[in-house]
Image (cartoon, rainbow, N blue to C red):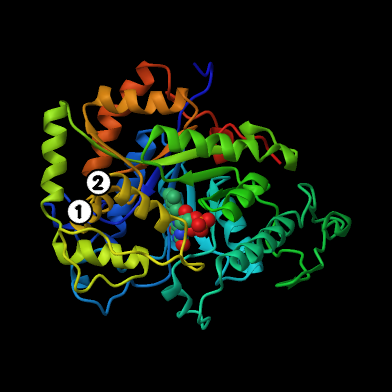
């Protein structure tokens, strides 16, 4: 048992749902990508379920729109995540607002400004998912072709983070006096220039946004490679990750927490939250039927395109019911490719079997079951130190989230594993993290 500790929950946003075929389901909001009211409903439902945070991933590209079958994909175009979260802030009170911004394509001064501003707007609920963006096509939207190799992307990310967190320290909490009588607006001794000169960035500072309520918005990361884990151990408050077995999640958990002490950090300073794709219904049988309806909606063209995009290869001429061809090692793509190859090998999956596996949960653990079965799974991973919480992935929005909030959240609360009200106003407080 982990006495007194509670499971943390992220709500991984996607317009129509996490399942590749979700948009074709009658319960889905097919126009979600341009339907702000839909996101308001999703955010409010997640807050009703007392989730710690909303999380939006982001890759600044339309995935391989020129290939066959991709007109069937719904992962193509939707509201830019940072703008979306800022717009959702006044519609919510407690839930954290976390999104991805890439260290490969943005400038640290702009990123520091944006997340500090969102923190002020939301009264302490902002978080930044720091990614280096593994997708080489995205680089073509920023004039950087070819994309930098991973090692260098992480080196750049490390410096980027130093600059951003340094800029967030530009103002002491009591720097703004605003004394109308004396005419003194701020105390310049409480303003700090950064004067950063590094390999990639030269940034003078200070930031032209005041100190935000959390002092430092939450830093989230999802890197799985050596470089990614090292960066997370040193700098992250939350880590998202993808595991299909308890053993691999435990290994990752112990590995990452074990790296923290050399940076003077305690294991509790970092919350590890694997993705969890849940199809839940009152009975197991109903949940399995629900899931199968979605699997049957996947068109083979889009399944193949999914694998081709993830792996950066062409499968043309391959038998869909045969094995994967040999994949050459890549220094540009991410460690997730290795995970897919291993899964296919371990479970003897054909190309069709592999895309069906990844179409649902993309390498995250997937469960279809009763509320008790879902809660049992979460409890097991939490107690066995495979997770501090989960990044929940609904097959379809909004219905998959509503099912989870109505069926699983009460079961977790009954077991004393999940909050019955928010602990605080700020994301940092709800996550149980210390103020910097
Ligand atoms: C839950 C989760 C969310 C992620 N979100 C993004 C994202 O929004 N944008 C992105 O480029 N990569 C995203 N990634 C990929 C990671 O940043 C990382 O590239 C990947 O896990 C592989 O790790 P590596 O780059 O260290 O090899 C995400 C990964 C996970 C597990």
The image position of residue 380, as x and y in percent, is 39, 24
Looking at the picture, tell me which residue is in the foreground, 292 or 124: 292
Note whether 120 is above or below 410 in the view shown. Answer: below
Note whether 13 is above or below 377 in the view shown. Answer: below
Looking at the picture, tell me which residue is in the foreground, 116 or 413: 413
Disc 1: residue Cβ within 8 A of ligand 1's nearest atom: no
| Helix, strand or loop under label 2 | loop
> Looking at the rendering, which quadrant does residue 31 occupy?
bottom left
Q: Earlier in the sequence, mark 1 or mark 2?
A: 1
Residue at 51% in and 67% down: 331
The image position of residue 236, as x and y in percent, is 61, 46
Report which residue position mark 1 lands on: 22
Residue at 74% in and 57% down: 166
Examine the rendering and report whether any part of residue 314 can be seen. Answer: yes
> Looking at the rendering, which quadrant does residue 391 occupy?
top left
The image position of residue 82, as x and y in percent, is 47, 61
In the image, 112: left or right of 399?
Answer: right
Say if mark 1 contacts mark 2, CB within 8 Å: yes
Examine the rendering and report whether any part of residue 75 can be seen. Answer: no
Note whether 168 is above or below 261 in the view shown. Answer: below
In the image, 237: left or right of 373?
Answer: right
Report which residue position mark 2 lands on: 395
**Quarter in which the C terminus is drawn:** top right
The image position of residue 253, as x and y in percent, is 53, 36
Residue at 46% in and 22% down: 383
């Amino acid at each position: 048992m982990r006495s007194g500790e509670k499971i943390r929950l992220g709500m991984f946003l996607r317009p129509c749902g996490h399942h590749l075929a979700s948009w074709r389901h009658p319960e889905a909001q097919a126009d979600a990508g341009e339907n702000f009211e839909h996101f308001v409903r999703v955010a409010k439902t997640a807050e009703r379920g007392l989730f710690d945070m909303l999380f939006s991933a982001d890759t600044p590209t339309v995935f391989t729109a020129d290939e066959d079958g991709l007109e069937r994909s719904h992962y193509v175009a939707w509201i830019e995540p940072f703008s979306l979260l800022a717009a959702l802030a006044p519609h919510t009170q407690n839930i954290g607002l976390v999104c991805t911004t890439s260290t490969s394509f943005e400038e640290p001064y702009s990123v520091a400004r944006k997340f500090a501003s969102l923190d002020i707007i939301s009264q302490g609920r902002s978080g930044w998912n720091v990614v280096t963006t593994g997708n080489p096509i995205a680089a073509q939207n920023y004039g950087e072709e070819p994309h930098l190799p991973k090692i260098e992307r992480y080196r750049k990310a490390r410096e980027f983070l130093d600059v951003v967190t340094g800029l967030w320290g530009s103002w002491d909490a009591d720097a703004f006096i605003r004394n109308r009588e004396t005419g003194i607006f701020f105390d310049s001794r409480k303003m700090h220039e950064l004067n950063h000169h590094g390999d990639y960035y030269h940034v003078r500072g200070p930031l032209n946004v005041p100190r935000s309520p959390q002092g430092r918005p939450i830093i989230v990361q999802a890197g799985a490679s050596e470089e990614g884990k090292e960066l997370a151990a040193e700098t992250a408050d939350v880590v998202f990750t993808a595991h299909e077995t308890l053993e691999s999640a435990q290994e990752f958990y112990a590995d990452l927490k074990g790296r923290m002490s050399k940076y003077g950090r305690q294991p509790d300073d970092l919350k590890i939250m694997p993705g969890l794709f849940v199809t839940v219904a009152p009975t197991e049988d109903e949940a399995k039927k629900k899931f199968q309806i979605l699997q049957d909606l996947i068109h083979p063209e889009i399944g193949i395109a999914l694998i081709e995009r993830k792996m950066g290869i062409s499968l043309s001429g391959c038998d869909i019911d045969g094995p994967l061809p040999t994949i050459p090692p890549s220094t540009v793509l991410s460690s997730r490719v290795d995970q897919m190859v291993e899964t296919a090998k371990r479970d003897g999956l054909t190309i069709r079997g592999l895309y069906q596996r990844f179409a649902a949960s993309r390498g995250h653990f997937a469960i279809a079951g009763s509320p008790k079965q879902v809660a049992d799974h979460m409890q097991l991973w939490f107690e066995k130190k495979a997770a501090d919480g989960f990044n929940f992935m609904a097959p379809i929005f909004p219905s998959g989230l509503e099912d989870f909030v109505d069926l699983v959240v009460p079961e977790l609360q009954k077991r004393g594993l999940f909050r019955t009200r928010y602990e605080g106003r700020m994301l940092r407080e709800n996550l149980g993290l210390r103020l910097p």
